[in-house]
């Protein structure tokens, strides 16, 4: 009989990652994460005396539609968008479990009334009246005040407590405060849930607004806005999707020794701290009580402001201000002292040599790579990657997004050969060029530790088509939960190879079918030897 109240069974059957809505109270409430479409909230007990308004608020503020409640005989499904509740008998679901999940997913479609587009729309309206007076960092600061107004009087904000700057409010700011506090359909936004569970996507989109904002007067003298496309967006400015950060953090923590009483975490290109927020959520979810040191660098002022705001909030609300935070704006992270770290997480800048216009930046890249990449024009991400590998403590772990060219390009062969000897690979995944929005870069994931091991890495290969990556990573989580060793179909392969690297002087990730073909073609040669 299917145990719907066992939260782990949702992982093993659907590949969903359960994250507690708020680990400090109501620990039977979870956000069930799929990678976007199909996410929902779940309580492992009956609806009881829940207030339906609060239920709608929680599901809406976590950017989901459905909230499930489990009692002895039924699953109750509430949906704020449809404004209804339905009771579904368990005995009808048990023999149609996959159909039930498809049904939930069909009711999870995205709309303009969801919390992220709702907040962004208000932010865009605010930008339309402030663009001539505020730079991007000040615009982001005003967004902080808008959000804080959900919890307290924005005119009396303690800027030290919230780790933000003082702002001069534009005319009509009170109007936008009223607008955001009204919410949608009388569903008031929950600041804690928004900042803990939707901030990554929200602030990444907000940063796009302030970076590429191009105000234009319309025929009637008003101001409209559009996002201006820039060539460098196709090679360097790539925001980490939440489901990618989530997968990397999950697999990094598999190798972390939770007997440690402290942990040092670094993201040397932190942006708005998608990785850092994610690992703090997962550490809290696992009940880690040791001392945490978090360090983050970025060259963007608005990104660093966002990181300080979000991490300070998480520290204050969930960790009783016991996390040691060091978040800094820097000109070039490569010249900073990264120290020695237990965990390094990053999505480094994918800037090609040709787009590194500043000679000093080029010199910094070459200085890092002088012993492993010679007579070439390396991508800046390679320097971040190599420096990270050298900035780990004993038993340290690295988890990152990388350009796939690092896995196979001839110019990086010496680097790969050196790291083959220094690192134990845990996961390599080739995901193609549909990971980043509006980007042409072929993307891979990499997780490794500097603890020597005889175990071979898990490889993930995906067909280069839109939408496949999310399904693949969900199937990977499901496979791990069920202790399965491999999965293979026309769209993706997940397996452990008999040896790695598969190809000489390369980390190229290939499908299971191609791997088996290579093994068969090499077998006669081995017999001849």
Image (cartoon, rainbow, N blue to C red):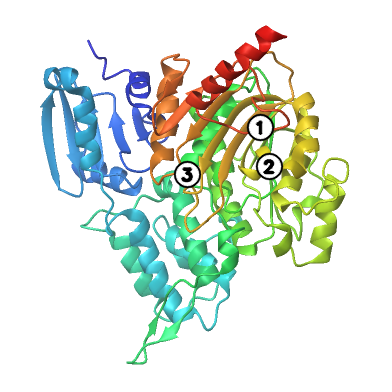
Residue drawn at x 45%, y 52% is 201
Q: Left or right: 438 with respect to 407?
A: left
Mark with earlier residue (2, 1)? 2
Disc 3 secondary structure class: helix
Badge 2: few (under 14), some or many (20 or more) residues near its Cα, within 10 Å? Answer: many
Q: Which residue is mark 1?
A: 507
**From the viewer's perspective, is residue 51 above or below residue 375?**
above
Q: Are marks 2 and 3 in contact (CB under 8 Å)?
A: no
Circle number at residue 96: none
Mark with earlier residue (2, 3)? 3
- Quadrant holding the N terminus: top left
- Quadrant holding the C terminus: top right
Residue drawn at x 81%, y 59% is 362
Circle number at residue 242: 3
Q: Residue 173, can we see it?
A: yes
Q: Left or right: 122 with respect to 495?
A: left
Q: Which residue is mark 2?
A: 406
Disc 2 secondary structure class: helix
Disc 1 secondary structure class: loop
Q: Residue 288, can we see it?
A: no
The spot of residue 462 in percent (x, y) is: 47, 36
Mark with earlier residue (3, 1)? 3
Q: Are marks 2 and 1 in contact (CB under 8 Å)?
A: yes
- Nearer the observer: mark 2 or 3; the answer is 2
Q: In which quarter of the view is residue 323 placed?
A: top right
Extreme residue toward the front, this view: 528
């Amino acid at each position: 009989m299917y145990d719907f109240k066992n939260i782990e069974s949702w992982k093993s059957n659907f590949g969903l990652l359960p994250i507690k809505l708020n680990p400090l109270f109501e620990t039977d409430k979870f956000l069930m994460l799929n990678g976007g479409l199909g996410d929902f909230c779940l309580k492992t007990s009956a609806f009881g005396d829940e207030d339906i308004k609060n239920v709608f608020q929680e599901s809406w503020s976590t950017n989901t539609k459905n909230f499930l409640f489990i009692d002895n005989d039924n699953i109750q499904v509430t949906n704020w968008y449809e404004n209804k509740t339905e009771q579904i008998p368990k005995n009808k679901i048990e023999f149609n479990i996959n159909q039930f999940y498809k049904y939930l997913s069909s009711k999870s479609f995205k709309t303009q009334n969801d919390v992220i587009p709702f907040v962004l729309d208000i932010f865009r309206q605010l930008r339309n009246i402030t663009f001539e007076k505020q730079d991007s960092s000040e615009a982001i600061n005003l967004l902080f005040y808008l959000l804080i107004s959900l919890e307290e009087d924005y005119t009396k904000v303690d800027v030290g407590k919230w780790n933000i700057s003082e702002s001069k409010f534009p005319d009509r700011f009170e109007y936008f405060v009223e607008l955001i506090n009204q919410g949608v359909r009388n569903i008031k936004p929950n600041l804690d849930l928004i900042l803990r569970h939707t901030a990554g996507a929200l602030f990444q989109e907000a940063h796009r607004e302030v970076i590429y904002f191009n105000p234009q007067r319309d025929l009637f003298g008003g101001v409209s806005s559009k996002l201006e496309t820039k060539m460098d967006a196709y090679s360097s400015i790539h925001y980490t999707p939440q489901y990618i950060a989530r997968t990397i953090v999950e697999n990094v923590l598999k190798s972390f020794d939770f007997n440690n009483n402290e942990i040092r975490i670094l993201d040397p290109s932190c942006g708005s701290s998608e990785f850092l927020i994610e690992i703090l959520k997962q550490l809290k979810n696992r009940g880690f009580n040791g001392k945490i040191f978090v360090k983050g660098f970025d060259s963007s002022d608005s990104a660093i402001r966002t990181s300080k705001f979000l991490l300070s909030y998480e520290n204050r609300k969930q960790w009783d201000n016991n996390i040691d935070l060091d978040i800094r704006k820097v000109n070039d992270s490569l010249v900073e002292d990264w120290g020695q770290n237990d965990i390094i997480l990053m999505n480094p800048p994918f800037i090609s040599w040709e787009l590194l216009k500043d000679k000093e930046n080029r010199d910094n890249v070459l200085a890092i790579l002088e012993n492993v990449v010679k007579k070439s024009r390396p991508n800046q991400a390679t320097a971040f990657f190599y420096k990270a590998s050298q900035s780990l403590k004993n038993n340290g772990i690295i988890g990152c997004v990388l350009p796939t060219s690092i896995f196979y390009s001839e110019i990086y062969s010496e680097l790969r050969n050196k790291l083959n000897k220094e690192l134990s690979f845990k996961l390599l995944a080739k995901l193609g060029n549909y990971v980043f929005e509006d980007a042409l870069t072929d993307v891979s994931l990499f997780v490794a530790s500097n603890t020597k091991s005889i175990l071979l890495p898990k490889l993930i290969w995906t067909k280069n088509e839109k939408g496949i990556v999310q399904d693949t990573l969900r199937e990977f989580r499901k496979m791990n939960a069920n202790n399965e060793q491999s999965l293979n179909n026309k769209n993706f392969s997940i397996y452990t190879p008999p040896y790695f690297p598969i190809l000489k002087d390369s980390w190229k990730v290939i499908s299971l079918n191609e791997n088996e073909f290579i093994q068969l073609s090499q077998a006669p040669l081995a017999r001849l030897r």
